[in-house]
Every structure is written in C-alpha cells, then in structure tokens.
Image (cartoon, rainbow, N blue to C red):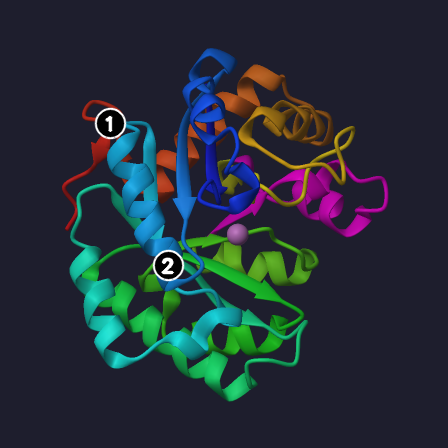
Amino acid sequence: MIFDTHAHYDDEAFAEDREELLSGLKANGVENVVNISASIRSVENTLELMRQYPFIYGAIGVHPSETEELSESRMAWLEEVSQEPKIVAIGEIGLDYHWDEPDKEVQKYWFVRQLKLARKVKLPVVIHSRDAAKDTLDIMKAEKAEEIGGVIHCFSYGVQMAREYLNMGFYLGIGGVVTFTNAKKLKEVVTYMPMDRLVLETDCPYLSPVPNRGKRNSSLNLPYVVKAVSELKGISQEEVIAITSENARSLYRISIASQGPASVR
Ligand code: NI
C-alpha cells in the first residue's frame, strides 16, 4: 500500500470534502499519510487531523515563508507538542528565496533554530528548499544535519546536489513533477538515485501529476507518480510501492508492528 510522506490536508482546498476524501484513501490503496505543517495555525490543524484519523501522522514546524510569526515562546510550544506520539518529524523547514519576503537572514535564523529543535527532540526533519541550493546545504553541513536525518521534500535540484544529500543519509521526496514532460532534471535524479532513498509525496493540494496537472492534488494521484518512477527505474509498480513505503517508515521511524513511532526517543 502507498505511503504519502508529504500532504497538506488541513489546506482550505479540502474544506468541502476532506472527510469523504480521507475516509476513502485506504480503499484506494493509500495506507498512511504524514500531514506536514507550514505555520503555527497548521500545526494545530495537523494535531487535530492526526487525532481524528489513525493512519495520519504529523510533522510540526514553520515553513520559511511563514517564519516571521516565530518566537522563542512559540518554539517552546513546538517542543512541547513534538512529544505527542504520532508526531514523526520537524517540518517543513528550510529556505525559500523564490519570494523576496521574509528577509533571507530571518529565514536562515529560524531554519537553524528549528534544526536545533529537531536535534534536541530527536526527530528527523522535512526540508523545503527552493531557489536556495547553496545556503540550504551550507547550513545543513554547519549544523551536522547528517546526524539528524530526514527528507529533502519536492527535490528540485540536479544530480550533483542529490549526491550531497544522499551522502548525508537523507531521503529525497518525489512527487507529481516527475510526470511532467519538461522535468528532465528530476528524471535524471530519479534515474541516478538508489531506490532505497526514494519516498513518494503529493505536497497536495499542489503539484498534481499528469494527467491531472493544474487540478487539486490528493494522495489518490500517487499511482501516476508510481508509474513514472517504475518506468525510470525499470522495476514493477508493485516494487515501487513496497520499497517506497518501507523507506517512508524508516524515514519517519514508524514500526510496522505497532503502526506507531518506534521507541527511538
Ligand atoms: Ni509542502
């Protein structure tokens, strides 16, 4: 069964049919979902979803574009919340230089601060890095992120950068973009990378794969991503699903027996 390692089901795009959609996932081959926070408000929403649905896990953290809302008192709250048993990661955190705001120094400060939180609470990180390849890698090296572990979500750089993160022990999150005809760079990365570091993600409601590109995304579209990966790697779709689900559980330290986080903390 499919494991969606990165979804935003608290997004207002799901306001109308969230319950119906989530309740139908299992019957459509999707076994687990990690709902990823992007702001303080979405941390609260993620906690609610996680408590309501046994198959949903949560990641808590503040997206680089929202870092101006962070403060030390909010960091203390995040640390407290991270102790909930179904919280499996700190994220999404990182750098996004696509937009001018917030200031790069603000983004960098809170990226480092949230990496330190992950180290302290012994959780892996979910990294968002857009148009900020060098600064992201520099910070992660300086913070010894290889000791923290995690995933580079919606990996968007080339083979050389992929090698850097794979050498640090990170997983790469692959989603709808791999089905786009113009995604030459990402197809090269998928061909290059070892299968045991690849995890599937939607980033829904964003980044729907072909043939649903441009429409609202959901975990139900992951079979299109599975198909694209199976063609690039020359293995069956069943193998892609089995390997990536095992990778996802290993990334988020979820043991199959308990279907809860392993006792690593
Ligand atoms: Ni995301």
Q: Is residue 21 magenta?
A: no
Q: Where does the image place residue 232, in percent across and percent down from the top left?
A: 72, 31
Residue at 29%, 72% in the rendered image = 116
Kindly identify which residue carries mark 1.
259
Per the rendering, the mark at residue 41 is: 2
Position of 152 relative to 191 (above/below): below
Relative to 40, is 204 on the left or the right? right
Q: Is residue 97 visible?
A: yes
Residue at 76%, 40% in the rendered image = 214
Q: Where does the image place residue 185, in percent across and percent down from the top left?
A: 77, 52
Magenta segment, which residues? 170-195
Which dot, 1 or 2, sits closer to the camera? 2
Per the rendering, the mark at residue 152 is: none
Q: Is residue 183 magenta?
A: yes
Q: Considering only order in the chain, which callout, 2 or 1, is on the residue closer to the N terminus? A: 2
Label 1 CA crowd tier, 10 Å (few <14, some 14–19, many 20+) = few
> Quadrant where the N terminus lies?
top left
Between 104 and 160, the one lying in front of the other is 104
Q: Where does the image place residue 240, in percent across and percent down from the top left?
A: 56, 24
Q: Label 2 sits on what residue type?
A: Arg
The yes-or-no answer for disc 2 within 8 Å of ligand 1 is no
Between 79 and 159, the one lying in front of the other is 79
Q: Label 1 sits on what residue type?
A: Gln
How many angstroms separate mark 1 from mark 2 (CA)?
A: 27 Å
